[in-house]
Every structure is written in C-alpha cells, then in structure tokens.
C-alpha cells in the first residue's frame, strides 16, 4: 500500500544560550499540511561568547556545524539526511554571528520518529565526516495525520559526554568525627570542551554509571545524589545531579573506598575516598584524646590515609599552659605511614589543649590533651585524682574524723579532703577489702583473709581472726554490731565492737560483697550467684529472701536510701540498677551503657551514685525522674570499684587499676 506524504513544520526546542539563558526558544507554528511534502525542522545556533557562563549550552552551542535527521516509522529503515548548518550554508540566515537554520525532511502519515544529531563538522559530499564529533542527540515521535493543519513540536537535545572533567582523584575525611558528606568535583564536557548545562531537560545522551567498592571494611561509605544517600551503585542522567559520598566516621587504618565513573565512549574516571586515622598503642591514648599523668610520658601517634601520599602538619594549642603540659615533635613520613610523638610536660591542664593534625587537602583531626601531673590534684571535668600510697585501692569511706580512708593492698591510707596523703597504716596481710565507720568513732574493715580489723583515727590497730576464709564486705548493723560477709563460704558473721564473734549465719554459696544496713532494722545481703537479696533481722538465724527479677543479673553492691528506706542494687551482669522497695516490689532500670556497676552510695542530692567499672566513669541515677548521667574519669581504664560520700560533699571513689583515689563534685 502506497503511503501518502504531507508537508509539516517541526519546531525543535534547541535554544541558544546567549545572554545566559538555560531554557529554549519559543516554538513556532508549522506550515499547512500538503500532500507529498516534507517536514521543516528549524534549529537556532547562538553566537560565540568568551564568557564561560554564556558558553554553557542548553543544549545547542555555537560550535554546531552540521546535523543529521533520521525519519523512521515502526521497524522500517530510517531515512537519514545530512545538513550543512555552518555560517555559509544556504539553509541558514544570520543575525550577527547567530544563525537560524531550517532542515527539510519527508514525513509520512502515521507515527513518525525524528532523530536529530548535531556535530562539530559540516557534511562533505552529503555525508558527515567520520572525524566529526557528536555534540548532542534528540528523538521525538509524533503522529502525522492527513487532516492536520499545523504542528508545533519540541525536541530537547541530549548532550554527549566526551570527558568527565574529574579534578579530585583523592578525597580525605576525618575518622571519629561522625557522619560526613563530601561532594565529588567533576564537570562533564562535550567534544567541543563545552560544559553541559544543568537542567531537567538536559539529560545525558550517554548516562554516567557510578560504582563504589570498599576495601578494609563495609557499610562505612556510600554514594549520594543531591545529598541523599543512594547506596553503592547509581546512574546519573542529567547534569543538575550532584554526586557525593557520605562516610560514617568509622573503620580503622587501611580502610578506603574506590569510586569509578563510566559512560559509553568516555575514558573511566576513578576517585579514592581515604579517611584519616590516628592511633596509638599507649594506655594514655583513647580516640581521640591523650591523658598524661606526669612529665616525660610519651605517646607515639600513627597517622594513616590509604591510597595517597599526603603530607601532614601537627600543631599544638599555643596557650602557655598547653605548651607546659605537652610538647609535639615534627611529623615523620607521609601517606599511610606517618607518625608524630606527643610528650607530657610538667604543667597541669584539665582541658582546652589540643593537637591538630592536618593533611595536604586540609582535612583535620583534633586530639584533646590533659595532664593531671603525678601527685597533683588537677580537676578534669569536675573530677580530681590523687595517687594511692599503696597498690590496688579498693574500699573507701568517710571516717568519723571527716577524713577519707582507703583500703589498699596490705595497708589503710588516710587522706584529707584536700587529697593530701595524711598517713598509712600497714596490716601486714597482702589482701584488700571493705571499710566502714563505726558509731563508736572507730573504723572497721576486713582484709580479704580471715581478719576483721578495728582502727582508731589516730592509727591504733587491732584485729581478730576467725575460721572463715575470705571476708569481702562489712557494714555496721542497726544493732550497733559489725556484720561481715565471707564471699567464698557463704557466711555472714556478726562481731561486737570489741571484735567478739556473736553469731554466724549460712547463706547460699558465694554471695557478693554487697552488704548494707537498712532503715527498717534489718541487714541486707546481695547474693550474686543466685540473684537473691537476704534480709537479716538481728537475733534471727533465718533471713527473709527476695528473689530478684530476671532483669537484674549478678547483683553485687547494695545501698539503703535513708529517705524512703528503699534498697538499690547494682546488677553487674545486666548493667542496671534495681530498686527493691520496702514492700518487696521491684523495678529494674537499665543504665544504657556497659558500666558493670560496682560500689553504690547515696549522694548529697539524694541520687544513687555508682562506680562504672567497665567504662571508667562514675554514674548517677536520679531517683525522682529515673534518668542516668555519667561523669568520665580522666584516666582511661581506671576500673573504679567503691565509692562513698565525703565530708566535703564530694563523691570519693577508688581506681583499682590506675591505683589512684578520685573525687568528683556532684
């Protein structure tokens, strides 16, 4: 069947960019259809401009010299015609250096597909030279009918990427600084080296495929498009899409991510994303802080950025106090193998001093520096630390004289509330335990063997031995006697203030060291092995038993609130505080971090304070609103064990591993 042809006019939306516009020229109504005719396609070519902003196309540029129009219908073979669009072409009319060109092609009835391709060379002998570069492509399908009178059709030209214009082969980011997003700098250009204009209609003829591959970790970095996380594979289809990466701040030395961009006919471009890591094996270092406790201590820091050869600078806070507190060496090495050494000075600082490491791309990491100085009493974040006279301080209490008394290996140390060591009294037994004040003005303690001791504030010592193996906890009961617990044999033994044995009670095997006198006239014991609390009434060998709920695991320390009479238990295994009310009901409060709560004390504010053994912190449980807060101990891995309210209103605690005594202002 013979097809009938009509004459139509196509107005392609191929806009000039002169004057900075990024849209299109208005469409113009087409000619009246006539049989056996052709379609007119008009294209406007802007004048050349020296202004980079005016050269940005949308998407026909001054460098267009030729074009082809292919008309097809269905699966038929396209009929392709080449056109000369140069300034001397008879198809074009000029206005200054700008020109408007009209191309005429046949257009049969039905759904016609018009494919327009622009080139940087005019045809020769009716053919576009093989050396010509494609500058843009456009495709439009329109139904042409015999009774059509006009047609105004728009075609948007897609820019063909010839070069990604990538300028940042390495991106560096700061580890440990939280989530960061970085834009990747690239500027795709066509074969005429013209940037492709941003715009929803200016899509790429050859879309960009982007992939991200991580090395040395996973899930730390992903791609972003216009600032929104988009995984590890994305396709960029238009030039107003901004490509970037987002990094969690985690990982360790050696980690990096590789980003590869590819598109048909374009040489691939590769970026590397390499976080800066700073580490040290010194116990004085925790990411990202250094806590010196004296002069001459050194912390060698390693600096690492994979996939690069960056150089680094390390600068210290310039305040005189910071210079006295620490000194910093020059940086040695580069890339993934650089180092700098920080050495403690004689000055004490509690904060505000930093080491800033900067790479050649201006990525920075800040290391905080403190120095408590050996034997000092520098307050860091409200916490003061004092060196213990003997090893492994454990039990602590406020004495009848207002001084602070500490159980240490084979000795008891006395400190003033100013932190000054006043005296030490040797026991001759190589063990440690708990210590409490008595109502008679003496101090009583157990030493972890079979001894119970009595100590006057002037230093007079006396003791008694029993058949038990290892006392671990002690309290003064409501009857005025001393109640001591043998952790290993499961025995609670009662002594008079003259150290005479009055009674012995057996309980479940291996109770904890937590024993406390309640406001109801009973003595309470936490049984860590069986998640039980025993309540002893003086003179009664059979205690009341409270089985703790399953949310409290490994109960250890216990304290009585003198205001409401309730008991509070530190649950080491579940990192929680359990409230045991006087009526026997229970409520468990999760701490929210892995503290392993040890010693408990009631603070001057009525809150329950506890030693965060595993997190090197002192915690506070606000009874009124059931919330937790934490105060960090300046010395890392201090392992606080016991605490007590001092006569000065501070919370005093022992640092078992750091061999220090600490105090904090509530």
Image (cartoon, rainbow, N blue to C red):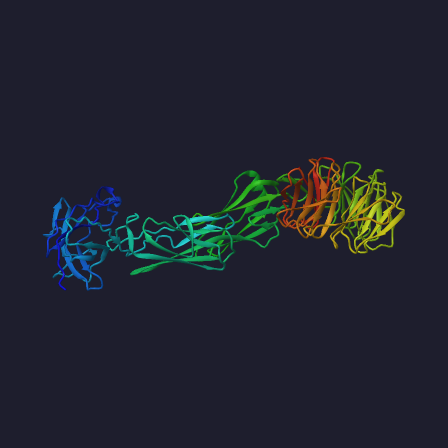
Nearer to me, 123 or 651: 123
Q: Position of residue 236 (x, y in %)?
A: 35, 54
Q: Could you say which is closer to the camera, residue 230 or residue 303?
A: 230
441 or 247, which lies in front? Answer: 247
Frontmost residue, 588 versus 603: 588
Left/right of residue 71 with respect to residue 386 in the rendered view: left
Q: Is residue 640 above or below residue 131?
A: above
The answer to whether 624 appears left or right of 254 in the picture is right
Residue 393 visible in this rendered orientation of the protein: no
Image quarter (top left, top right, bottom left or bottom right) of the C terminus: top right
The residue positioned 62% from the left and 47% from the top of the image is 592
Numbered label tally: 0
Residue drawn where x is 72% and y is 44% of the image: 585
Residue 267: image x %, image y %? 32, 60
| Residue shown at 57% from the left, 44% from the top | 369
Q: Position of residue 587 (x, y in %)?
A: 69, 45
Regarding residue 561, the answer to whether it shows in the image is: yes
Residue 548 spot, x, y in % from top left: 72, 50
In the rendered image, the quadrant that contains the N terminus is bottom left
564 to the left or right of 73: right
Q: Is residue 446 left or right of residue 328?
A: right
Q: Where 294 falls versus 143 (above or below)?
A: above
């Amino acid at each position: 069947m013979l097809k009938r042809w009509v004459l139509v006019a196509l107005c392609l939306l191929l806009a000039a960019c002169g004057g900075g516009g990024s849209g299109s020229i208005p469409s113009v109504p087409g000619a009246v259809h006539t049989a056996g005719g052709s379609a007119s396609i008009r294209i406007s070519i802007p004048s050349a401009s020296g202004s980079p902003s005016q050269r940005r196309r949308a998407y026909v540029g001054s460098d267009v010299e030729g074009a082809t129009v292919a008309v097809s219908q269905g699966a038929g073979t396209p009929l392709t015609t080449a056109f000369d669009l140069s300034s001397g072409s008879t198809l074009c009319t000029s206005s200054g250096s700008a020109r408007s060109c009209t191309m005429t092609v046949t257009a049969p009835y039905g759904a016609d597909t018009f494919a327009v391709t622009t080139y940087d060379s005019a045809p020769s002998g009716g053919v576009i030279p093989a050396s010509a570069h494609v500058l843009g492509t456009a495709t439009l399908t329109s139904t042409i009918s015999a009774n059509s009178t006009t047609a105004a059709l728009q075609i948007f030209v897609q820019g063909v990427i010839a070069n990604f214009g990538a300028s940042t082969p390495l991106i560096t980011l700061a580890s440990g600084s939280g989530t960061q997003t970085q834009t990747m700098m690239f500027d795709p250009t066509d074969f005429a080296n013209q940037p492709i204009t941003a715009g929803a209609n200016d899509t790429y003829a050859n879309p960009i495929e982007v992939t991200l591959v991580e090395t040395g970790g996973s899930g730390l970095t992903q791609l972003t498009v216009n600032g929104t996380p988009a995984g590890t594979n994305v396709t960029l289809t238009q030039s107003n899409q901004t490509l970037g990466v987002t990094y969690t701040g985690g990982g360790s030395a050696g980690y990096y991510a590789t980003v590869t961009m590819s598109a048909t006919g374009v040489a691939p471009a590769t970026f590397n994303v390499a976080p800066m890591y700073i580490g040290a094996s010194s116990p004085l270092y925790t990411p990202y802080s250094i806590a010196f406790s004296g002069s001459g201590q050194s912390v060698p820091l390693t600096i690492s950025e994979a996939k690069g050869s960056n150089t680094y600078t390390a600068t210290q806070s310039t305040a005189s106090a910071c210079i006295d507190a620490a000194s910093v060496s020059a940086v040695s090495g580069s890339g993934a193998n650089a180092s700098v050494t920080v050495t403690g000075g004689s000055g004490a600082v509690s904060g505000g001093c930093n080491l800033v490491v900067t790479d050649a791309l201006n990525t920075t990491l800040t290391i905080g520096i403190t120095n408590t100085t050996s034997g000092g009493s520098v307050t860091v974040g409200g916490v003061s630390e004092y060196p213990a006279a003997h090893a492994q301080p454990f039990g602590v209490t406020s004495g009848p004289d207002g001084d602070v008394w500490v159980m240490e290996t084979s000795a008891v140390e006395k400190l003033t509330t100013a932190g000054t060591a006043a005296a030490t009294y040797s026991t001759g037994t190589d063990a440690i335990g708990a210590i409490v004040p008595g109502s008679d003005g003496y101090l009583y303690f157990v030493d972890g063997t079979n001894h119970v001791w009595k100590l006057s504030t002037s230093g007079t010592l006396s003791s008694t031995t029993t058949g038990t193996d290892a006392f671990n906890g002690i309290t003064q009961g409501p009857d005025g006697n001393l109640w001591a617990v043998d952790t290993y044999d499961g025995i609670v033994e009662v002594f008079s203030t003259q150290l005479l044995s009055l009674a012995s009670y057996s309980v479940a095997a291996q109770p904890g060291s937590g024993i406390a006198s309640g406001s109801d006239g009973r003595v309470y014991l936490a049984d860590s092995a069986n998640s039980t609390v025993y309540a002893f009434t003086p003179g009664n060998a059979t205690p009341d038993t409270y089985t703790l709920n399953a949310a409290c695991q490994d109960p250890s320390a216990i304290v009585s609130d003198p205001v409401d009479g309730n008991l509070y238990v530190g649950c080491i295994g579940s990192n929680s505080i359990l409230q045991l009310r006087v009526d026997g009901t229970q409520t468990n409060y999760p701490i929210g971090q892995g503290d392993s709560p040890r010693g408990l004390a009631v603070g001057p504010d009525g809150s329950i304070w506890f030693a965060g053994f595993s997190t090197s912190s002192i915690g506070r449980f606000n009874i009124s609103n059931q919330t937790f807060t934490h105060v960090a101990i300046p010395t890392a891995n201090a392992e606080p064990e016991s605490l007590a309210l001092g006569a000065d209103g501070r919370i005093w605690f022992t640092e078992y591993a750091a061999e220090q005594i600490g105090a904090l202002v509530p």
